[in-house]
Amino acid sequence: MGVPDEAVAEDYALSAPHLLEHYEHIEDETVRRELIEDMVGVTPETILTLLAHVREAHGGAAAYLAAGGVTAEELGRLRRRLRVAA
């Protein structure tokens, strides 16, 4: 999406604890437990590995999202939103 991998990994590390706090308020216990389990133990190195895999296997995040049905217009809005929030 045009953001350096290191910035994504660093942001994930900073935001993960806040997401976990948010997940604690999800009423559906199964959903809550799965979301929390998915986040526990994820490190910046994990994110860097994931991003490298997405790039190698799918051509990058934008290509991966487009293959899943995200339109060019939606990708543009996502890019703008992520860059403004950063």
Image: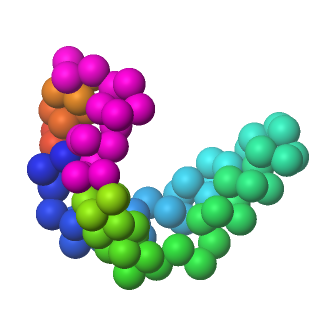
Judge left or right: residue 3 versus residue 67. left
Residue 67 position (above or below residue 35): above
Residue 42: horizontal and vertical position, in percent?
A: 53, 74
Residue 70 on the magenta segment: yes
Total count of labels? 0
| Quarter location, residue 4 | bottom left
Q: Of 44 and 51, which appears nearest the observer?
A: 51
Q: Start and end of the magenta stretch?
A: 58-73
Residue lying at 44% horizontally and 76% vertically, measured from the top left? 46
Residue 38 on the magenta segment: no
Judge left or right: residue 41 versus residue 77. right
Colour pattern: rainbow
Question: Residue 11: in sight, yes or no?
Answer: no
Residue 69 position (above or below residue 49): above
Task: Examine the residues drawn in magenta and state their main secondary structure.
Answer: helix
Judge left or right: residue 1 versus residue 29. left
Residue 21: horizontal and vertical position, in percent?
A: 64, 56
Residue 5: horizontal and vertical position, in percent?
A: 22, 66
Residue 35 position (above or below residue 73): below
Q: Of 57 and 19, which appears nearest the observer?
A: 57
Q: Of 12 and 25, which appears nearest the observer?
A: 12
The residue sitting at the right extreme is 29
Residue lying at 35% horizontally and 66% vertically, measured from the top left? 53
Residue lying at 69% horizontally and 60% vertically, measured from the top left? 36
| Quarter location, residue 35 | bottom right
